[in-house]
Every structure is written in C-alpha cells, then in structure tokens.
Image (cartoon, rainbow, N blue to C red):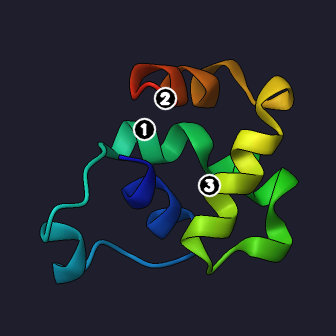
Amino acid sequence: MATLVLTTLSGMSITPALAQGHMGTPQEQNACSRDASRFCRKDLGNDGAVQGCLQANRSRLSKACSKVFQSHGM
C-alpha cells in the first residue's frame, strides 16, 4: 500500500509496474498527497524516502493520512 501511495505522490501515474504487486486505493493515495507535498517535498520521486519522511512526521500528518498508515500496520 505505502509503495503505491508514494509512487503516486512522487508524480508518477499508475503504470504497469504498479500492477505488479503494489497496493493501495486512489483514496489512500489522495489521503497522503498533501502531507507528502507539505513535509517531504525534497524527497518526492524517491518512494522509500517519502515513506520514511511521512513516518518521521507521523505526529504532524493529517487525520486521513495517519489512518492510511494505521490501517496497514505502520
């Protein structure tokens, strides 16, 4: 899930690579896009870095994005 969220956040559209095991709904992607732009702008384009950045800013995330991470045990 987080990989799909982050791939979308990094400015990429859904591609065949995402069909190869990436998970997450458009709603989940949408829930974190504003937080990624706000807190992790310098990391956009690097999925792992964005995920780490969002987790590092966990206490500052929007309620919707926080719920996405919680729902996936992160």
Say left or right for 25 vs 73: left
Label 1 to label 2: alpha-carbon separation: 6 Å
Picture layout, residue 63 above or below residue 24 = above
Label 3 to label 2: alpha-carbon separation: 12 Å
Amino acid under label 3?
Gln
Badge 3 local density, few (<14 within 10 Å), some, or many (20+)? many
| Front-lying residue, 7 or 26 | 7
Residue 16 is situated, as x and y percent measured from the top left of the image, at: 16, 81
Amino acid under label 2?
Val
Label 3 to label 1: alpha-carbon separation: 13 Å
Pair 3/2: label in front: 3
Residue located at (85% from left, 52% from top):
39
Residue located at (29% from left, 42% from top):
25
Amino acid under label 1?
Glu
> Under tag 2, what secondary structure?
helix
Residue 53 is situated, as x and y percent measured from the top left of the image, at: 76, 54
Residue 27 is situated, as x and y percent measured from the top left of the image, at: 39, 37
Q: Are marks 1 and 2 in contact (CB under 8 Å)?
A: yes
Q: Which residue is mark 3?
A: 51
Q: Which residue is mark 2?
A: 68
Residue 33 is situated, as x and y percent measured from the top left of the image, at: 62, 51
Badge 2 local density, few (<14 within 10 Å), some, or many (20+)? many
Q: Which residue is mark 1?
A: 28
